[in-house]
Image: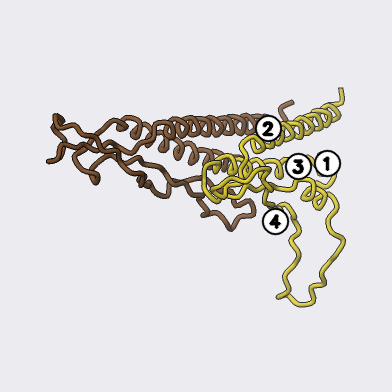
Chain colours: A brown, B yellow
Amino acid sequence: MSLFNIFDISGTAMSAQSLRMNLTASNIANADSVAGDEKSAYKARQPVFSTILEEMGQSEAAGGVRMLAVVESKASHNRRYEPGNPLANDEGYVYDSNVNIIEEMTNMISASRSYQNNVEVINTSKDMLLKTLKLGNG
Amino acid sequence: MPDLDRLFGVHPQALIMRSRRSSVLAANIANVDTPNYKARDIDFKEVMSRQVQPPSIRIERSNPAHIALPSNITTTAALKYRIPQQASLDGNTVESQVEQGQFAENAVRYQASLTFLNGKTRSMLKALSGE
């Protein structure tokens, strides 16, 4: 019954999108974190999605989504002169995170919209299934 | 019961194809942010026309090792790739609005088939009760 597959497909998509929201929240929360050197400064994290292709043998071959990996942004870090900061290095510099707030906000909106789309899909499929169960009851 | 099959007409097969199509469309919507995912769809018209008028070509099986043609076309539904209106940089061809529209349309048509089936069973029951 293909309609039951939809719960799996949209469910994986919802969990992938909520993981993406978690990463965005972590990035936004750490936007102002500083560190004493470039290596330990906070780096923005982004998810990499991929399709689950396990059931490719089936004719419909419909697959859900999974998070393949989390990649760290390679953008450069901003260096500030703050000798009073306890995290500053010997020369008095601190390194900002490389989070781009605008990018994170758009990511957040995109993730929440995709999540809502999948909720709608599940709701519609649920209605279709319930109506099918009532088939023949007049 | 061949007579009951004729009573319900094309709607049982239509329901199967509609539910398959909705799962394909749900996969498209689920993969809206997956890089390199190619949106797909079932050509409903083509599949149903094959279902209603099975191909007249027949294969002579003179040896038991010969493979028969699939009797039920719905098991080998033709999946086709969607051509995007506007290609995106990450190779994903899902267009959210298109998929949502198609999904809604598919759901309504599924329910239309259900309504037809309900009507048929109701009239059959009425005929049986003989009031």
Same chain under badges 3 and 2? The reply is: yes
- The quadrant holding residue B44 is top right
Secondary structure at badge 1 equals loop
**Foreground tag (3 vs 1):** 3
| Residue A132, x across and y down, in percent | 67, 33
| Type of amino acid at the residue the image marks with label 4 | Thr
| Residue B14, x across and y down, in percent | 75, 42
- Mark 3 or 4, nearer chain start: 3
Residue at numbered disc 4: B76
Vertical side of B16 occupied by A85: above or below: above
Residue at numbered disc 2: B104
Vertical side of A135 occupied by B53: above or below: below
| Residue B96, x across and y down, in percent | 61, 37
Q: Residue at x 35, y 40 (%)?
A: A44
Closer-to-camera residue (A96/A72): A96
- Mark 2 or 4, nearer chain start: 4
- Mark 3 or 1, nearer chain start: 1
**Foreground tag (3 vs 2):** 2
Question: CA separation, marks 3 and 2?
Answer: 16 Å
Secondary structure at badge 4 equals helix
Q: Residue at x 55, y 51 (%)?
A: B36
- Evaluate if marks 3 and 2 touch, with contact meaning CB atoms under 8 Å apart: no
- Mark 3 or 2, nearer chain start: 3
Q: Residue at x 48, y 49 (%)?
A: A50
Which chain does tag 2 point to?
A: B
- Evaluate if marks 1 and 4 touch, with contact meaning CB atoms under 8 Å apart: no
Residue at numbered disc 3: B14
Closer-to-camera residue (B78/A80): A80
Same chain under badges 2 and 1? The reply is: yes
